Image: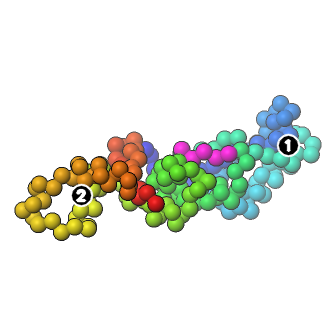
Amino acid sequence: MNTLTLSETRIYVACLASYNSGRLHGKWIDANQDEETINEEIQQMLKESPEPFAEEWAIHDYDGFGGLCLSEYESIEDIVRHAEMINKHGEAYIAYAGNIGSDYVTEEGFEEAYQGQWDSEEDFAEHIVEETMEIPEHIRFYFDYEKYARELFMGDYYSIRDDEHKVRVFRNI
């Protein structure tokens, strides 16, 4: 996967009065702005509508949110929050939010769950062993990291493989 950039996270907001009249009228809006600025851009788009009394809008498309499923009526507050988290944490946040559901994601939950990116689950298991156990050097050769990884990922952790065949590891909370 390529790393997302700030400018790639955007929403397409459509005028529903135009849509219901068989016309397409809307605007792509950068999601990396504050709520007030996004709302101002939406109101400006509605003012420019070819339909009189254009007041309602919906999100008809979006880019840069990865596997997150945004609804037509997603709050601007949530759009801004997701865009900020994607900017801060990149694809790891997208993987996490896509797995647990974007309605339930908090920054604290993400930061508590995310354990990093590893070449494999076995590499993560080896890291856990090194951080939490004191295994004498002469016994290390006999330790089965594959079995230990399988045990860790049966309950305490889960992983999501990316396009580069690396795994992003998350703790089940």
Q: Give the range drawn in magenta.
A: 67-71
Residue pointed to by mark 2 = 126
Of residues 51 and 167, the one drawn nearer to the viewer in this rendering: 167
Residue 47 shown in magenta: no
Residue 151 in the figure: left or right of residue 90: left
Instruction: Give yes or no for contact between labels 2 and 1 (Cβ–Cβ under 8 Å).
Output: no
Q: Quadrant of residue 71?
A: top right
Residue 112 in view, yes or no: yes
Secondary structure beneath dot 2 equals: helix
Amino acid type of the residue that numbered disc 1 sits on in the rendered structure: Ser
Position in image of residue 100 (x %, y %): 52, 51
Residue 69 shown in magenta: yes
Q: Which mark, by number, is residue 49?
A: 1
The residue that appears at 76% across and 54% down in the rendered structure is 41
Above-or-below relation of 79 to 131 = above
**Which sits earlier in the primary sequence, circle 2 or circle 1?**
1
Amino acid type of the residue that numbered disc 2 sits on in the rendered structure: Glu
Q: Quadrant of residue 36?
A: bottom right
Position in image of residue 66 (x %, y %): 53, 45
The residue that appears at 83% across and 30% down in the rendered structure is 22
